[in-house]
């Protein structure tokens, strides 16, 4: 345990690559802002995903070449994007009908906290002077079929983000299916956090020490 | 003869009254009807309730309207921007109230309002602070909250092309809330980048049929919010 913490576990790109492996060919996907956006760069060869952005575009492509963008062709993070061949535009009620009506297959979101029962907190720290802003997060977790969280295992201050119960205001109740962190892949099960996979060089105890509640070991040998 | 074209932008917003509820199209700068908002700032109506996904950026457009002290209440989903302190300051001082609504609930409330539906149930926000105090009902073993339809006195929106019947098309993701706001407002005012003769818009391609539109004003080469903010422009 003498290795500096910042050299243990996956990088942001490796985390995104790990998530991309689990998204099936042909999925309609909505990606949150931040690390989730990196998923597009790591889709395995031969697999086609269709990206939805809630401000009214399905078939979203990468950022435009410098000088080629349109300030009215943007993503949910308000950055300029492109529309791929086969893309479609639509208004906000249709866009959220795609989300709330269960038509989007996978959503990848960031998190402040995830609880062992699948509760997510990712929109507010509840600080009294903060400007509350929710965007589409509550709609996504309520309506999309599979919700993945991609996040650092701990906060910048070293506090666990995987907890017994969220202390921050909730985005949704029991909505998360799986969490991908720099240290591990963890499923939400009826029994709680179930370890699925450890990042290279990371032991069970190392992850358990950095998790705010009980972590169920993988079937078979404990540790790595 | 039906002719919804209004030649002067100040005439287009002349009857917006103090205390009105005004839906403003746009998601970030995409679809923001900046020239109509600036005309509304000049017109002087105050104590407005404004419905928009955001609260503007810099000190132009919607942020300019808020900065001018005309907005007593915002109904929106995401009032944070990286480059504007206008709303946060007025919110913290209590001068501008906030009704925070999940983005999909906001869209559906506007759609419902425009379609004559007074209320609907949704799973969004169940078990969260934004669902607190709302009527809960179970359908097929899942909880839903009751949300009410949203209407407005006016909608200010930006289209790409329009004709004298009020038919409107949009540019890419500038469409966002505009078609549903056009349905939900008593008086819908649209600025269009190009005004065309009736029949020039393909009926198959019209996004907002003119029945939802009351006034069309031609604003050639509309400003982009990000370009104004980058140049340090403020309004008024």
Image (cartoon, rainbow, N blue to C red):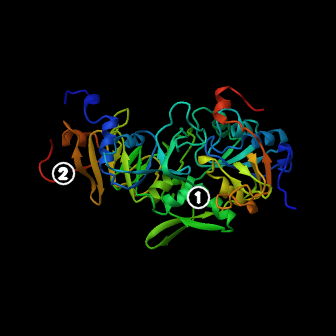
- The disc, 1 or 2, on the residue closer to the chain's N-terminal end is 1
Question: Which type of secondary structure does the marked residue at label 2 adopt?
Answer: loop
Q: Position of residue B173 (x, y in %)?
A: 59, 47
Mark 1 crowdedness (10 Å alpha carbons): few <14, some 14-19, many ≥20:
many
Q: Residue B131: name its quadrant.
A: bottom right
Position of residue A81 relative to residue B102, above or below, is above
Instruction: Provide the chain ID for the residue under circle 1.
Output: A
Mark 2 crowdedness (10 Å alpha carbons): few <14, some 14-19, many ≥20:
some
Q: Position of residue A172 (x, y in %)?
A: 45, 55
> Same subunit under labels 1 and 2?
yes
- Nearest to the observer: residue B160 or residue A186: B160
Q: Position of residue A3 (x, y in %)?
A: 21, 27
Q: Position of residue B219 (x, y in %)?
A: 77, 42
| Rendered image: mark on residue A93 | 1
Question: Which type of secondary structure does the marked residue at label 1 adopt?
Answer: helix
**Residue depth check, mark 1 versus mark 2: number of the one nearer the observer:** 1
Q: Is residue A201 visible?
A: yes
| Rendered image: mark on residue A220 | none
Position of residue B35 relative to residue A4, above or below, is below
Determine the residue located farthest toward the front in the rendered image: B200
Instruction: Provide the chain ID for the residue under circle 2.
Output: A
Q: Residue B213: name its quadrant.
A: bottom right
User: Which quadrant would the C terminus of chain A be assigned to in this image?
Assistant: top left
Position of residue B189 relative to residue B117, above or below, is above
Q: Which residue is mark 2?
A: A218
| Residue located at (85% from left, 43% from top) | B10
| Residue located at (11% from left, 48% from top) | A221
Q: Is residue B131 visible?
A: no
Position of residue B183 relative to residue B54, above or below, is below
Determine the residue located farthest toward the left in the rendered image: A221
Is B187 left, or right, of A132 in this rendering? right
């Amino acid at each position: 345990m003498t290795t500096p913490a910042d050299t243990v576990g996956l990088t942001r790109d490796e985390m995104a690559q790990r998530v991309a492996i689990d998204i099936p060919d042909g999925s309609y996907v909505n990606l949150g802002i931040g690390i989730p956006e990196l998923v597009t760069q790591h889709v395995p060869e031969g697999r086609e995903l269709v990206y939805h952005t809630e401000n009214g575009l399905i078939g979203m492509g990468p950022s435009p070449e410098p000088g080629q963008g349109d300030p009215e062709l943007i993503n949910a993070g308000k950055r300029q994007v492109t529309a791929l061949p086969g893309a479609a535009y639509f208004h906000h009620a249709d866009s959220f009908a795609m989300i709330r009506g269960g038509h989007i297959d996978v959503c990848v979101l960031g998190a402040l906290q995830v609880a062992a029962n699948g509760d997510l907190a990712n929109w507010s720290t509840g600080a009294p002077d903060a400007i509350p802003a929710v965007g589409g997060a509550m709609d996504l977790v309520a309506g999309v079929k599979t919700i993945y969280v991609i996040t650092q295992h701990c906060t910048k201050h070293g506090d666990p983000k995987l907890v017994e119960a969220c202390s921050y205001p909730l985005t949704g109740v029991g909505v998360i299916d799986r969490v991908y962190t720099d240290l591990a892949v963890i499923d939400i099960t009826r029994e709680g956090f179930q370890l699925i996979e450890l990042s290279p060089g990371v032991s069970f105890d190392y992850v358990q020490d950095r998790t705010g509640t009980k972590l169920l070991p993988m079937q078979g040998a404990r540790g790595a | 003869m039906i002719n919804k074209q209004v030649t002067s932008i100040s005439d287009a917003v002349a009857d917006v009254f103090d205390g009105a509820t005004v839906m403003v199209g746009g998601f970030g700068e995409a679809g923001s009807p900046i020239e109509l908002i600036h005309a509304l700032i000049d017109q002087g109506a105050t104590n407005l309730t404004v419905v928009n996904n955001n609260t503007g950026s810099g000190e132009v457009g919607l942020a300019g309207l808020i900065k001018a002290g005309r907005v007593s209440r915002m109904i929106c989903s995401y009032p944070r921007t990286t480059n504007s302190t206008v709303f946060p300051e007025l919110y913290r001082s209590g001068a501008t109230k906030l009704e925070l609504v999940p983005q999909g609930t906001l869209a559906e409330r506007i759609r419902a309002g425009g379609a004559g539906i007074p209320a609907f149930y949704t799973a969004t926000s169940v078990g969260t602070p934004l669902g607190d105090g709302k009527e809960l009902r179970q359908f097929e073993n899942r909880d839903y909250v009751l949300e009410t339809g949203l209407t407005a006195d006016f909608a200010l929106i930006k289209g790409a092309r329009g004709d004298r019947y009020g038919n409107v098309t949009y540019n890419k993701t500038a469409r966002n809330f505009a078609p549903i706001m056009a349905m939900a407002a008593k008086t819908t005012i649209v600025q269009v980048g190009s005004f065309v003769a009736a029949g020039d818009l393909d009926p198959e391609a019209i996004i907002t049929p003119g029945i939802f539109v009351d006034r069309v004003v031609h604003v050639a080469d509309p400003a982009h919010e990000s370009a104004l903010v980058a140049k340090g422009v403020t309004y008024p």
